[in-house]
Amino acid sequence: MATYKSLSASLNWPTGQPPSRTTTLITGTLSAEGSILIPHFTNTTFEAQTPVILISFRHTYNHYMHIMRKMGVHTNRHKLQFVNALATGDFSNLPPATRPHFTLNEWPEFFQWLSEQKPSTVILDGVCGLLDVGHNVDSVLQFIGSCQRIVEEKAKDEYAALVVNVLLDEFSELLVRSLVRRAHFLFSFEGLASGASSGVSGQLTVVPGHLLCQLQNAFSPALLHYRVSDTSVQFFSPGQSSTVL
Amino acid sequence: MAMATGLSIKRIAAHQQHSVPLLVLSETAQQTALSLMEAMVREGLGHGLGVVVVCLEQLLSRDIMCQPAVALVDCRPTMAQIGDGSAFLPNGTRQIDLARLDRDVCSQIERISTVSKVSGGFVVVIDDLEPLLNISRVDTLALLRKFRSVAKQCQSSRILARYSRDTADQRTDKGGPHLPLVSNVLRSISDAVVDVYPMSVLGTWMPGWYSNGEPQPFVTLGDNDERRGLLRLEHRRQSGKVGYEVAAFEINEQQRPVFSAVKAVATVEPSAVAAGPDPRQHLPFNLDLTDKQRQDRADVELAYLEAQAGEIHYQMAEEDDWDEDDPDDDLEI
């Protein structure tokens, strides 16, 4: 996926992956979705021969499969495990290709299952959905904090990292402010300050999270513009869209 | 920014000022205080103090935790507690026994004081306060007061705590509808409070800053710089006097804090204004006034000037309440 390589180069991440044992927080808005980075993190993890566990509070397995196929990410059920956090029940009647690997019923049961998996990149998509169904911020932080602890335990010998994607609005701001304190990297997607543009979909600000100071890491904060098309996402420096697109 | 040796924060961080048994660092999502707190812990270790680290969320950096003079009180949920769901209450609050925490910290203080090179001197680092405040604000403040009184017994000892001022009031134990703000309460029991900010806010502290009313982005480039930031110190002295200070901090190569004074007031040099060229010099038209034009302008009678300069006669209505007293009576001028 050549389009994401410009993002990796801007961040000084040679493999495109965040360092092991880290937590990356992605925030987006209604006009600038942060989930466009999920194919990127998935693909870079696959290239490093590491599996991915995707826990979604927003979409079904089909949704992600279609998008990743368009973006050129080759998923298979051995490399990508999907956890449906939207609905509970028995999904055994579903075809194997779309059946989730796990459903989020009782949290301790899920944490037990997660602890038994191989070291992976764990992606939580749409955790603000927990706020929407009535959980308070502390409960959501408890869930994410437990996932974070499990990932850190797994990352002792092999690569494992946590990526959390959340919509930032007035209802989730308190959650996001608390998550920034528990993250090493913050990717903030938002619309252009100057208004909409046909050539540029939005802007991405990448800054350290509170925990980055504990890593000896040569990380470069970045401000980039990006454009989303049907099969790719291109990142470029502000003002360079006519050169790149 | 020139180095200023007279900064209180510099003396406090270097343990040259002993009247700060409880120091609280406050942060926001835009600027972490973690790097400054760890640098101050390293400063304490460098001065031969023993350190007790109370970890509620994350451990401190490895180079600190591996020091022999550092003891850990680990309050993080264990993997077994996460697996069986016993780490948290149903409302998401952590299950922490504050009485046991008190005993563990005091026993570690006793133990670490014996290895401290400064007789009995120690630093207790609480990272961070929010889970404790979430359980019970009253009990947490009582705990802090107790630790503070223990620290006061040894001149160079200190309690160092970190909390998030942009989330604490909304996430911590409510207790009742009229509880004071967490930040106000912590200020009342602390000897010093350090609020950290990103360097980018310095421009907003200067007079003349103008906002066009547009909402500010959640993060900007330069936020959460782990190497530098801005701080505002509020230092309550034993005499009751409260001192305020604004400084910049930087974490140097040795991971120690370096403080410098900040000029937060914009000044304009008068000579710079006077020395500029006259903008009317090379214009194709004349902006100067002749003497006759000046006189004619002074002779213009303003239509409503008489009405403005004269007395105002006001007819009081039934609902009016006339006050005979001079409203400026309480001014001591």
Image (cartoon, coloured by chain):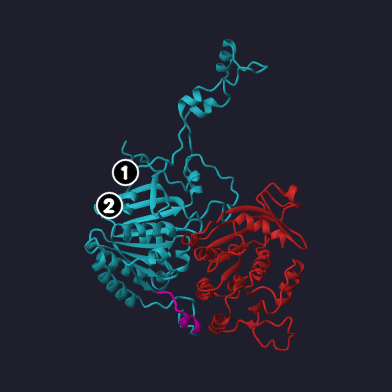
Give the Cα separation between the discs numbered 2 and 1. 12 Å
In the figure, B124 relative to A196: above or below?
Answer: below
Q: Which of marks 2 and 1 is nearer the N terminus?
A: 1
Q: Are dots 2 and 1 on a single chain? A: yes
- Residue tagged 1: B6
The residue shown at (74%, 81%) is A97
Q: Mark 2 points at which residue?
A: B16
> Where is the C terminus of chain B found, in terms of image quarters?
top left
Mark 2 chain: B
Place of residue B53 in the rendered image (x, y in percent of width and height, measured from the top left): 36, 68
* Picture quarter with the N terminus of chain B: top left
Amino acid type of the residue tagged 2 in the rendering: Gln
Residue B228 belongs to the span the image colors magenta: no
Q: Kindly identify the residue that appears in the image at 28 percent across and 61 percent down.
A: B49
Q: Give the range drawn in magenta.
A: B75-83
Q: Is residue A209 left or right of residue B260?
A: right
Which chain is in cyan here? B
Q: The red chain is which one?
A: A
Tell me if I can see residue B181 in this picture: no
Foreground residue, B328 or B188? B188
Q: Identify the element where label 1 is drawn.
A: loop
Q: Can residue B161 be seen in this view?
A: yes
B158 to the left or right of B208: left
